[in-house]
Amino acid sequence: MKIYNHLLNTVKAKGAAYLILLDPDKLSDSKIIPFVKHCEKSGVDGFLIGGSLLISGDLNSFIETIKVETSLPLIIFPGSVNQISPLADAILFLSVISGRNAEHLIGKHVTASSLIKRANVEPISTGYILVESGVTTTAVYMSGSLPIPKNKPEIAAATALAGEYLGMKLIYLEAGSGAQEAVPDEMVKAVSEECTVPIIVGGGIRNPQTARRKVENGASIIVTGNFFEDENNWDLIKDFSSAIHYKLPVEV
Ligand code: 1GP
């Protein structure tokens, strides 16, 4: 529970936590180190690592490279059961609870559990809720399940509460990487009011104001990925951090 507790403490101290998603397929080798350093000095609280396919290279060496450069938590956000590494600090043990595909509710878990135990990586049980966001996202397609309609916050809230009652430690509201629309504020609010576990919100968040609104509506952790694949946006990382860390004084 070390990394989970660390996340809880970060949320308590800063108001909310900011994680950046690193997809080894999308980040060129020459950019990994400068990007991670930039994130660390811009107030990011940790990294999610994973991708839907992970075809370019090796997850272990990717994590090894990053680990030398940062002391921030490295948490695997697995796109498949192949994405397990003893070098990570934790792994989101995801169940796609918005769907009814048994493979993503228990099947993959049976395949992965012993591997995670032997890798000695902290599993963090996470209820993963896919939300309709304008286009068919990779996450929806790969999960073989329907997302929750974006105008049905009450279904998302009931789903999240069911996840919490099943023992999940985090609820992840996912619009999907590169989503046209982020998870609606009303849905974030409905879910956070219904649950006591921290709510992660990710997908389609492209500016600090949007990130802040999700926090104001009850998100505890914000994830961005896509937006910083363009190096021209890197200077905005600290603006995202300040918007998300509402309990910290804003730097001038
Ligand atoms: C993490 O999938 C997200 O939940 C990341 O989404 O790439 O759209 O920021 P973006």
Image (cartoon, grey):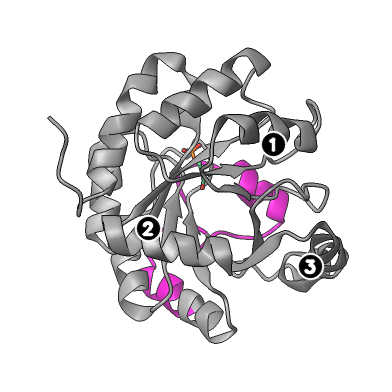
Q: Please check the rendered image and state whether residue 122 is part of the magenta-colored stretch, yes or no.
A: no
Q: Is mark 2 within 8 Å of ligand 1?
A: no
- Residue 83, given in percent of the width and then of the height, sits at 77, 47
Q: Which label number is shown at residue 109? A: 3
Residue 128 seen from this side: no
Q: Which label number is shown at residue 10? A: 2
Q: What's drawn in magenta, residue-wise?
A: 130-158
Q: Specify whether 159 is left or right of 42.
A: right
User: In this picture, is 43 found above or below 150?
Assistant: above
Distance between mark 2 and mark 3 Cα atoms: 28 Å
Position of the C terminus, as image quadrant, is top left
Q: Residues within 10 Å of mark 1 (few under 14, many from 20)?
A: many
Distance between mark 1 and mark 3 Cα atoms: 22 Å
Q: Secondary structure at mark 3?
A: helix
The residue to which callout 1 is attached is 63
Q: Amino acid at mark 3?
A: His
**Earlier sequence position, callout 1 versus callout 3:** 1
User: In this picture, is 15 found above or below 32?
Assistant: below
Q: Nearer the viewer, residue 40 or 111?
A: 40
Q: Please name which of the two marks, 2 or 3, marks the residue nearer to the observer.
A: 2
Contact between marks 2 and 3 (CB within 8 A): the answer is no
Q: Secondary structure at mark 2?
A: helix
Q: Amino acid at mark 1?
A: Ile
- Residue 163, given in percent of the width and then of the height, sits at 55, 78
Identity of the residue drawn at 77% across and 61% down: 120
Q: Please name which of the two marks, 1 or 3, marks the residue nearer to the observer.
A: 1
**Earlier sequence position, callout 2 versus callout 1:** 2
Q: Residues within 10 Å of mark 3 (few under 14, many from 20)?
A: some
Q: Amino acid at mark 2?
A: Thr
